[in-house]
Image (cartoon, rainbow, N blue to C red):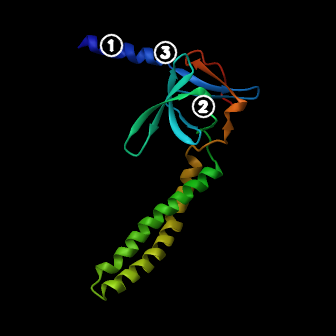
């Protein structure tokens, strides 16, 4: 039992020591991505894992709804990238507000559509027409009074994407976690 714990400790400790930061740099700034940090590369969101094959490839983790998939990407195929460190971004706030409105519209619309079917008046056609009307009205009300404001506030506080960086203007290097003395200026 003690040997297994010792092996787990050694593997965990060595992975911490051997992991490397991905650094995009030029004369003006350095942008550092650490292990398990969110990065958008060529329009797709990934989590940066580590460098591979003489530091010419990187291992990325692509998360789906219920799946996770490891992907290997050549560093020369990176055309654009974004960080996810920006807070208090109005772009992110409006993006989340729209998403909140859609969720509120869906919930309110569903409740409004289902309401006439709980009554015993009218035919199925009248209930459907009434449900569609009531669902759209209730969807707009719930989406605009609850969904959009909550989404806006969440978007201001949550981390959002930075501006789009074009990798042509940056050099790529891999920096050890321990000896990382490059300052992140973002």
Q: Percent position (x, y) of residue 133? A: 45, 80
Which of label 2 and label 3 is nearer to you? 2
Q: CA distance from mark 2 to mark 1?
A: 37 Å
> Horizontal placement of 5 versus 27: left or right?
left
Secondary structure, mark 3, is: helix
Disc 2 designates what residue?
A: 77
Q: Percent position (x, y) of residue 163? A: 67, 42
At 47% across and 71% down in the image, what residue appears? 139
Disc 3 designates what residue?
A: 17
Q: Which quarter of the image is occupied by the C terminus?
A: top right
- Identify the residue at the far bottom of this view: 122
Q: Earlier in the sequence, mark 2 or mark 1?
A: 1
Q: Earlier in the sequence, mark 1 or mark 3?
A: 1
Q: Percent position (x, y) of residue 85? A: 60, 38
Density class for disc 1 (Cα within 10 Å; few <14, some 14-19, many ≥20) is few
Q: Which quarter of the image is occupied by the N terminus?
A: top left
Q: Percent position (x, y) of residue 83? A: 60, 37
- Identify the residue at the far right of this view: 27
* Label drawn at residue 7: 1
The picture quadrant where one finds residue 180 is top right
């Amino acid at each position: 039992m003690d040997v297994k714990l010792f092996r787990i400790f050694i593997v965990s400790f060595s992975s911490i020591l051997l992991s490397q930061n991905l650094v995009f740099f030029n004369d003006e700034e350095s942008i550092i991505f650490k292990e398990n940090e969110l990065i958008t590369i060529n329009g797709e969101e990934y989590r940066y894992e580590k460098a591979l094959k003489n530091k010419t490839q990187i291992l990325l983790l692509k998360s789906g709804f219920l799946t996770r998939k490891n992907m290997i990407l050549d560093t020369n195929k990176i055309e654009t990238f974004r960080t996810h460190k920006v807070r208090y971004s109005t772009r992110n706030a409006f993006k989340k507000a729209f998403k909140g409105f859609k969720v509120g519209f869906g919930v309110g619309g569903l409740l409004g559509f289902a309401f006439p079917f709980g009554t015993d008046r009218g035919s199925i056609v009248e209930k459907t027409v009434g449900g569609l009307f009531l669902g759209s009205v209730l969807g707009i009300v719930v989406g605009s009074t609850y969904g959009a404001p909550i989404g806006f506030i969440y978007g201001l506080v949550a981390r959002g994407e930075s501006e789009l960086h074009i990798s042509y203007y940056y050099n790529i290097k891999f920096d050890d976690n321990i000896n990382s003395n490059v300052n992140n200026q973002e």
